[in-house]
Amino acid sequence: MTLKNLALGTTALIGVGLLGGVSALPAAAAEISPGGALNLTITGFARFEAGGGEQDDLNLDPSFSRGLDFRNDTEVHVIARGKSEQTGLEYGGTIEFEADTNSTFNTDESWVFLRGGWGEIRMGDEDGVVDSSIIGGQTIAAGTGGIDGSSFVVAGIAGEGVFPTETDDSTKIRYYTPSFGGFSLGVSYTPTVEDVGSGANNGQFIARKSGPLAMEAQDVVEGGLIYDGDFGGVGLKASIVGQYGKLKNGARADAAAGGFGGSDDWYSGVGGVALDLFGFKLAGSVGTDNVGDTDHQFATAGIGYGIGPVNTSVTAAYIFDSNDDFSERNGYDKPYNVVFSADYALAPGLVLAGDVAYFDLDSNGASGTGDTGWAGVGSVRLAF
């Protein structure tokens, strides 16, 4: 929905009424009045989910119920876009609002961008290069996202099994080059991370060097080499992404105190490929993640196929190696998760989706729950 014309007309009427016919002075070049230089678009999604299964085992928490449950996942995105006719510079910003009724912190991401022949730079609370360019089994998943889908089916292995520990939406600067023959480079810099593996306490929050609100990491640099094109008539996407930063304060506390161990290194690397071959979609990845004294290595794989409006996939995530510190902190050693997914397009913007997962979390017994089980979810997904 474009709001520019309505806002321009309203502004003009108010201006005439207030000025009483007196000629207005020209606005400063950098000034943007409401409804002025930028086009505004409102978009987003609303999702209803019904799920259940052995949620206590999936989450390694006996307090979780195994009964049927409902949940919502709703966001509203406000997108502002503009372009300078003199320079060709494109610019704007995006604000993503969490619209669920129980959301206390109601903004997910918020960033501004500049784009030209030299590439694109984003500044604000936005995903880093690792999250935005990682490729793996989840890339081709149907349903709610397979091994990167609804928390009804991936809660016990999400993060450790599919992705490395990331900077999430921590405030950063991110840059991508233009594509050259299908290749592009990306880099992002996050000066401080308040909570490792989370985007909490970002935006206007100013980092603390000590005290109960002290930052947990700093100077995190992410990079990636990405390819998106055709190779011998086969659709090919591939990427190598990685990051490095330093842990600080509470994140360096002893594992017994709930921290990440004594080391202050935080680094990861993931390589992944996705193919589109004779109607089949194949994808996989392998990676390593090291946060202080905890480390683990993981792999993902997936196969998908579409028949008209129906998409299907089978995706899997597996931690094939981990150390004792990782096991102690997470409660499991070498878990895996296999998710069967499908979705069906009912109408433009309206999709039915579902996933059924089988998991083996290989727990170390600390949680008091079982190792294996199943979980499922069905979803009505509206995009607008």
Image (cartoon, rainbow, N blue to C red):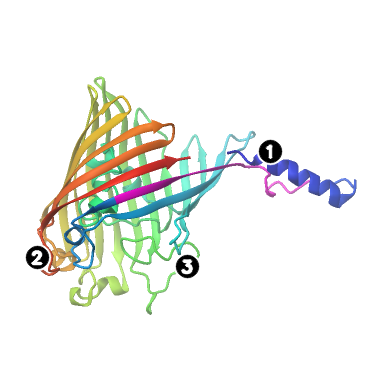
Q: Earlier in the sequence, mark 2 or mark 3?
A: 3
Q: Which residue is mark 1?
A: 5
Answer with left or right where residue 43 lies relative to residue 251: right
Q: Position of residue 323 (x, y in %)?
A: 11, 62
- Magenta span of residues: 25-50
Q: Quick check: can you spot residue 25?
A: no
Answer with left or right where residue 11 lies relative to residue 261: right
Instruction: Give the quadrant of the N terminus.
Output: top right
Q: Amino acid at mark 1?
A: Asn
Q: Nearer the viewer, residue 9 or 99?
A: 99
Q: Which residue is mark 2?
A: 364
Assess disc 1: are there few (<14), some (14-19) or many (≥20) residues with their C-alpha within 10 Å of its C-alpha: few
- The disc placed on residue 205 is 3
Residue 329 figure quarter: bottom left
Assess disc 3: are there few (<14), some (14-19) or many (≥20) residues with their C-alpha within 10 Å of its C-alpha: few
In this view, the residue farthest toward the bottom is 211
